Image (tube, rainbow, N blue to C red):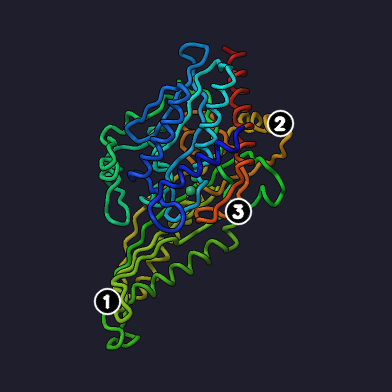
C-alpha cells in the first residue's frame, strides 16, 4: 500500500492546526471540518458517494456487486488533543483512504458495500466525553446531553456544533442501523510500547479499556498570602494537592492492578502569586478494563475527596463528564485479522488497548475489530508522537485483506 501517499496525506492534515507546538485541531472546530473536507475530497475523487451526517461524521460509500448488501466499514478520527502529534486517529483515516484507493484501482469489486469513515470529535480533551461522533452513530446521544457538556471556555457542545454548521438538534438521525452492517475494522497507532518492544509490526486488539471522567470543583477562601496565618486558611489548591496524591495512591494499591488514574487539568483561581487559591477545578480520568472497578474507583475517589475537603473547610462539587465501558472485541474478527497478518507474513501479536477508540462505540452496532501499528517510543498525545509510514502502509495491507475476508465470508453465506 502507498507509504508515499500516506505521508503526503499526513502532512496535509498536520498543516490544519492552530498555531503553536504540535497539532491542535479540536473536536467540533472549524479546523476539524477542514480536515473532513480533505477526506471527502480524496474519496469523491475516487468516485465514491460521500456525505456528512448531523453529528459531523463523514462517510464515503463504495457500492458492492450485490445491490442493497450490508456494509463493511473502516475509519477513525481527524480531531486531536491540544498540542498533539500527527498520527492519532489520522493514521486510521489515511489507511481508510488508501484502502479505498487500493480497491478502486485494482478493479476488483467487493460483494458487500464498503464504507470509509472519518468520525467527528473523538477526543475527550475538549468536552470530557470521548468518541462523540461514534456515540451518535451508536445512537446513544440525545440533544440535552450535548447541552450539558461544555469546554474550558464554557462553550457547550451544542453551540460548538452549530458554529461549524452541524445540527445537534437532529443528532438522532446520525444513528447507524445494525441491520445495514456486517463489520467495522479500525486501524490506529498503538500509543504504547508493546509492539516496538517485541519487534512486531501488527497488533490485533482483543479489548478496549473504559474510562470514567469527573470534573471536580473546590471552593475555598481566597485571601492575602501575607496577612492570613497558615492555621486560618481554606486553601483550595492544598486540598486539590491532597486529592491528586490520593489518586496515585489508590491507583497503585493492591486492589488496583491495571487501573490508571490521571489528573490532566488543574485550573487555579485567581492564579496570583500573592492570593491564596480560592477556587480550583480539576479533572480525573479513571481507566480500567474492569467496568465495575472503574466505576467503584471513581465513587471511592469522590467520597475520599469529600473527606479531604471537609477536614480543610473547602467546598466540593463533582460532575461526571464522561463515562464509557470497556469492551471485549469479538474473537472471530480477531481471528480474521490474525489470518490476514499471517498471510502477509507480518509478525503480529494480540494486545489490549488502554486508550479509547471509536470502535468501542461502533461495537454496539456491529462486530468490530482493531489493528494497531507501532508507536515509536510509545509516545502519544504529544508532538513527538511518531509511527513509520511504512508500518501504516503494512497495517493498511492487513486491513484490506481482513475486510476482503469478511466480504468473502458473507458472500459465501449470502
Ligand atoms: C483517546 O485518545 C483517549 O483519550 O483514549
Ligand atoms: Mn485516537
Ligand atoms: Mn487520542
Residue 161 in sight here: yes
Q: Is mark 2 within 8 Å of ligand 2?
A: no
What residue lies at 62% left-to-right and 52% top-to-bottom?
376
Q: Which residue is mark 2?
A: 344
The residue that appears at 44% across and 72% down in the rendered structure is: 242
Is 196 above or below relative to 393? below
Q: How many marks?
A: 3
The quadrant of the picture occupied by the C terminus is: top right
Q: Which mark is residue 353?
A: none
* Residue 205 placement: quadrant: top right
Q: Considering only order in the chain, which callout, 2 or 1, is on the residue closer to the N terminus?
A: 1
**Which type of secondary structure does the marked residue at label 2 adopt?**
loop
The location of residue 18, given as percent across then percent down, is 38, 52
Q: Nearer the viewer, mark 1 or mark 2?
A: 2
Residue 203 image position (x, y, % from top left): 64, 41
**Residue corresponding to mark 1:** 222
C-alpha gap between disc 3 and disc 1? 41 Å
Left or right: where does residue 290 sit relative to residue 234? right
Can you identify the residue that label 3 sits on? 378
Label 1 neighbourhood size at 10 Å, few (<14), some (14-19), many (20+)?
some
Q: Position of residue 289 (x, y in %)?
A: 55, 47
Label 2, label 3: how many angstroms apart (C-alpha)?
25 Å
Amino acid at each position: 500500500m502507498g507509504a508515499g501517499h500516506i505521508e503526503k496525506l499526513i502532512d496535509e492534515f498536520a498543516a490544519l492546526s492552530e498555531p503553536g507546538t504540535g497539532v491542535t485541531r479540536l473536536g467540533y472546530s472549524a479546523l476539524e471540518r477542514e480536515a473532513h473536507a480533505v477526506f471527502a475530497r480524496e474519496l469523491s475523487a475516487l468516485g465514491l458517494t460521500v456525505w456528512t451526517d448531523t453529528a459531523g461524521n463523514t462517510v464515503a460509500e463504495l457500492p458492492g456487486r450485490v445491490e442493497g448488501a450490508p456494509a463493511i466499514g473502516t475509519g477513525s478520527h481527524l480531531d486531536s488533543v491540544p498540542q498533539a502529534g500527527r498520527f492519532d486517529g489520522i493514521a486510521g483515516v489515511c489507511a481508510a483512504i488508501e484502502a479505498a484507493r487500493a480497491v478502486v484501482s485494482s478493479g476488483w469489486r467487493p460483494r458487500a458495500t464498503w464504507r470509509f469513515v472519518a468520525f467527528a470529535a473523538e477526543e475527550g480533551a475538549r468536552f470530557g466525553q470521548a468518541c462523540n461522533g461514534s456515540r451518535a452513530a451508536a445512537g446513544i446521544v440525545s440533544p440535552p446531553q450535548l447541552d450539558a457538556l461544555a469546554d474550558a471556555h464554557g462553550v457547550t457542545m451544542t453551540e460548538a456544533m452549530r458554529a461549524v454548521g452541524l445540527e445537534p438538534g437532529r443528532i438522532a438521525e446520525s444513528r447507524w442501523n445494525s441491520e445495514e452492517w456486517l463489520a467495522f475494522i479500525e486501524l490506529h497507532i498503538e500509543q504504547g510500547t508493546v509492539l516496538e518492544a517485541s519487534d512486531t509490526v501488527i497488533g490485533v486488539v482483543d479489548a478496549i479499556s473504559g474510562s470514567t471522567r469527573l470534573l471536580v470543583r473546590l471552593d475555598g477562601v481566597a485571601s492575602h498570602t501575607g496577612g492570613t496565618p497558615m492555621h486560618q486558611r481554606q486553601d483550595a489548591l492544598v486540598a486539590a494537592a491532597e486529592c491528586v496524591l490520593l489518586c496515585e495512591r489508590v491507583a497503585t494499591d493492591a486492589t488496583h492492578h491495571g487501573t490508571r488514574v490521571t489528573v490532566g487539568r488543574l485550573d487555579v483561581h485567581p492564579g496570583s502569586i500573592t492570593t491564596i487559591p480560592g477556587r480550583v477545578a480539576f479533572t480525573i480520568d479513571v481507566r480500567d478494563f474492569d467496568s465495575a472497578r472503574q466505576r467503584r474507583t471513581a465513587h471511592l475517589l469522590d467520597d475520599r475527596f469529600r473527606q479531604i475537603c471537609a477536614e480543610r473547610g473547602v467546598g466540593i462539587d463533582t460532575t461526571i463528564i464522561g463515562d464509557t465501558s470497556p469492551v471485549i472485541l469479538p474473537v472471530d474478527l480477531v481471528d480474521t485479522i490474525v489470518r490476514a497478518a499471517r498471510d502477509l507474513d507480518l509478525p503480529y501479536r494480540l494486545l489490549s488497548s488502554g486508550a479509547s477508540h471509536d470502535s468501542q462505540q461502533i461495537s454496539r452496532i456491529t462486530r468490530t475489530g482493531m489493528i494497531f501499528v507501532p508507536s515509536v517510543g510509545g509516545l502519544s498525545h504529544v508532538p513527538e508522537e511518531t509511527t513509520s509510514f511504512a508500518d501504516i502502509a503494512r497495517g493498511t495491507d492487513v486491513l484490506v485483506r481482513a475486510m476482503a475476508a469478511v466480504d468473502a465470508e458473507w458472500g459465501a453465506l449470502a
